[in-house]
Structures are given as structure tokens and as C-alpha cells.
Image: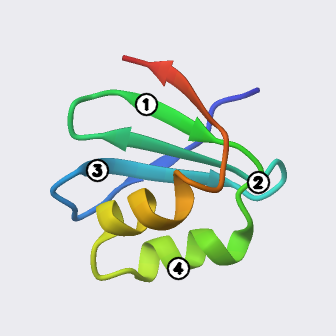
């Protein structure tokens, strides 16, 4: 899988977030520097993540329980 462009986000838990709409892959860089890819994430969930009052809470409550994650970097 190729590189996914991420954008900086205003979050205490997340540093940057990117999405590939062709593969439905969400890439998240955490404040710790760890980077994870969440697979087959529906576009509506990505829109909701970006619109959430707390991106970290939305990720923990809606994305992590529903989608497979693969660590890309530590």
C-alpha cells in the first residue's frame, strides 16, 4: 500500500490524520508518534471523525472497535 497523506489535527491524542478514499484506509499518527492504519473505514465514519468535538474519543469509541488496525510505525 502506498503513502497516505496526513493533515495535522487539533487533538490532545492525535497528531495527524489521513484517508485514502480509493482503498478506504484511514491513517492516524498518535501524539506518541505511533502510526496506525485502519482498514475498510467507511467514508461517513471519516467525515464524522473530522467533525467530532473530540477526535480521540470518536476514534476510541467508533473506529477502533469496528475496524481492523495495522501498526505502520512505532
> What residue sits 71% from the left and 70% below the top?
43
Q: Farthest residue in the top direction?
A: 74
Mark nearer the N terminus (1 vs 4)? 1
Mark nearer the N terminus (2 vs 3)? 3
Quarter-of-image position of residue 29: top left
Mark nearer the N terminus (1 vs 2)? 2
> Whole-percent x and y of residue 11?
21, 61
Dot 3 alpha-carbon crowd within 10 angstroms: few under 14, some 14 to 19, many 20 or more:
many
Dot 2: what SS? loop
Dot 4: what SS? helix
54 sits left or right of 44 in the view:
left
Mark nearer the N terminus (2 vs 4)? 2
**Is the image coloured rainbow, by chain, by secondary structure, or in one colour?**
rainbow
63 relative to 32, above or below: below
Give residue 35's mark.
Answer: 1
Give residue 48's mark.
Answer: 4
Dot 3: what SS? strand
* Residue under label 2: 24
- Mark 1 to mark 4 CA distance (whole Å): 20 Å
* Residue under label 3: 14
> Whole-percent x and y of residue 41?
70, 57
Q: Are dots 1 and 4 in contact, CB under 8 Å? A: no
Dot 1: what SS? strand
**Quadrant assignment for the C terminus:** top left
Q: Farthest residue in the right direction?
A: 22
**Quadrant assignment for the N terminus:** top right
- Mark 2 to mark 4 CA distance (whole Å): 14 Å
Dot 2 alpha-carbon crowd within 10 angstroms: few under 14, some 14 to 19, many 20 or more:
some
Amino acid at each position: 500500500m502506498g503513502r497516505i497523506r496526513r493533515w495535522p489535527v487539533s487533538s490532545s491524542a492525535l497528531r495527524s490524520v489521513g484517508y485514502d478514499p480509493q482503498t478506504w484506509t484511514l491513517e492516524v499518527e498518535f501524539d506518541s508518534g505511533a502510526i496506525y492504519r485502519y482498514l475498510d473505514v467507511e467514508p461517513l465514519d471519516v467525515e464524522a471523525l473530522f467533525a467530532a468535538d473530540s477526535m480521540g474519543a470518536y476514534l476510541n469509541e467508533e473506529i477502533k472497535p469496528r475496524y481492523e488496525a495495522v501498526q505502520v510505525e512505532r
